[in-house]
C-alpha cells in the first residue's frame, strides 16, 4: 500500500489480509479488517469529527500530519470514525495471543484483544497490540469528563 | 535447611527471589503497555507462544524507579508462582546463591516490602522478595 493514497477496505489490499496495521513509528496497533469500513486521508474526510485513536487508549497522540488517516470502524454502535497518525497496511498476523486473565489490569484493558507479531516465532520483535473494536467504539461513544 | 536465591539488580539495588520459581532468564524483551494498567502491572510481553504479564518490581517495592511507559532493563526474568506466570525486568542477574536458613534474618523495616527477610550477599543486605506477596499485589 502506498502512503498518501486513500485506501478503502475490501480492496485488493485488504482481501485475505485480516488485520489493518497502524504503525506510527513508536507503537504498532492492529484492528481486524472485518471491522474496517474505510480508510481515508484526513484531508479528504468530510464526515463527523473523528476520535483520536491513541488518546482513546491513554497514549500520547502522534504528530506526523502526512500520515493522518481517518479509519471508519463498523461496530454494533454504528460507524465510528477514528483518526490516527500512522502508516496503514493490511496484513496477515500469524496469531493473536490473548492478554492473560487473573491480573488486576483495570477496565481499559478490554480495549486490547491481545498481542501479535508480524511473523511466527518473532517474540523478540516489537509486539503489536490488537484492539477490540467494539470496546473501542463504546469508549469513543462515552462522553468526555 | 538451605534455599537457593537468585539475585536481581533493580537500578542500584539488589533483591533476591527464590530460584525455584524462575523458569527462564532472557535478554531485553520488548513489552507493550496495556491501556489503563497500573504502574505495578504495566504491560505484557510474549513468551513461549503466549502473552505474559510484566510486573514492575520498582513500582511495587519502591526500591528503584518505576519502568514507566517505555522503560526497559537488560534482563527479563520469567517466574512461575503456582498457576501464575509473569515477567520481571532487571538490570542484571547474578548466579544462584545457596544460603543456609541461619543466614536469613528479619529484614530492616525499610526493606520489608513484599517480604520480611533479607540475607547478606556481596557484603550487602539483600531483601528476599516473597513472590506470593508479589502475585497477591497484582492479581
Image (cartoon, rainbow, N blue to C red):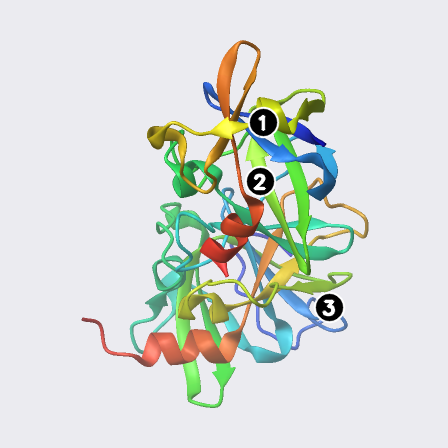
Chain to which the residue tagged by mark 2 belongs: B
- Dot 2 or dot 1, earlier in sequence: 1
Q: Answer above or below: position of A128 versus A41.
A: above
Q: Which residue is nearer to you in this view: A117 or A69?
A: A117
Q: Is residue B132 left or right of residue B24?
A: left
Estimate the spatial distance between the alpha carbons at disc 3 and disc 1, rounded to whole Å: 43 Å
Q: x%, y% of residue B31? A: 58, 45
Residue extending farthest to the right is A121
Please state if B10 lies on the left or on the right of A83 as rendered. right
Residue at the (38%, 27%) spot, across then down: B108
Quadrant of residue B20 in the image?
top right
In contact (CB < 8 Å): disc 2 and disc 1: yes
Q: Is residue B68 visible?
A: no
Indicate the chain on which mark 3 is placed. A
Question: Which residue matches tag 3?
Answer: A17
For label 3, count other residues whose C-alpha is less than 10 Å away and answer few (under 14), some (14-19) or many (20+).
some
* Same subunit, tags 3 and 1: no
The circle drawn on residue A37 is none
Residue behind mark 2 = B88
Residue located 66% across and 29% down the image: B5
Q: Secondary structure at mark 1?
A: strand
Q: Could you give the CA–CA distance between mark 2 and mark 1, rounded to whole angstroms? A: 10 Å
Q: Residue at x 58, y 40 (%)?
A: B88
Q: Nearer the viewer, mark 2 or mark 1?
A: 1
- The percent position of residue B36, horizontal first and vertical second, equals 39, 60
Residue B82, position as x, y percentages in the image: 68, 57
Amino acid at each position: 500500500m502506498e502512503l498518501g493514497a486513500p485506501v478503502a477496505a475490501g480492496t485488493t489490499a485488504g482481501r485475505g489480509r485480516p488485520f489493518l496495521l497502524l504503525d506510527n513509528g513508536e507503537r504498532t496497533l492492529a484492528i481486524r479488517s472485518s471491522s474496517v469500513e474505510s480508510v481515508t486521508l484526513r484531508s479528504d474526510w468530510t464526515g463527523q469529527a473523528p476520535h483520536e485513536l491513541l488518546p482513546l487508549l491513554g497514549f500520547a497522540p502522534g504528530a506526523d500530519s502526512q500520515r493522518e488517516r481517518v479509519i471508519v470502524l463498523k461496530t454494533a454502535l454504528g460507524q465510528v470514525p477514528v483518526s490516527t497518525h500512522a502508516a496503514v497496511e493490511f496484513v496477515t498476523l500469524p496469531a493473536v495471543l490473548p492478554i492473560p486473565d487473573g491480573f488486576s489490569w483495570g477496565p481499559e484493558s478490554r480495549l486490547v484483544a491481545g498481542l501479535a507479531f508480524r511473523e511466527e516465532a518473532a517474540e523478540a520483535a516489537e509486539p503489536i497490540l490488537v484492539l477490540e473494536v467494539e470496546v473501542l467504539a463504546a469508549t469513543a461513544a462515552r462522553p468526555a469528563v | 535447611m538451605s534455599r537457593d536465591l537468585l539475585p536481581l539488580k533493580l537500578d542500584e539495588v539488589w533483591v533476591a527471589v527464590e530460584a525455584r520459581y524462575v523458569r527462564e532468564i532472557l535478554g531485553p524483551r520488548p513489552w507493550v503497555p496495556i491501556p489503563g494498567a497500573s504502574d505495578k502491572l504495566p504491560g505484557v510481553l510474549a513468551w513461549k507462544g503466549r502473552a505474559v504479564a510484566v510486573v514492575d518490581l520498582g513500582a511495587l517495592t519502591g526500591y528503584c524507579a518505576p519502568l514507566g511507559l517505555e522503560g526497559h532493563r537488560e534482563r527479563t526474568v520469567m517466574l512461575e508462582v503456582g498457576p501464575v506466570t509473569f515477567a520481571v525486568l532487571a538490570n542484571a542477574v547474578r548466579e544462584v546463591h545457596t544460603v543456609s536458613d541461619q543466614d536469613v534474618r528479619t529484614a530492616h523495616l525499610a526493606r520489608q516490602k513484599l517480604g520480611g527477610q533479607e540475607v547478606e550477599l556481596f557484603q550487602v543486605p539483600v531483601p528476599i522478595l516473597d513472590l506470593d506477596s508479589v502475585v497477591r499485589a497484582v492479581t
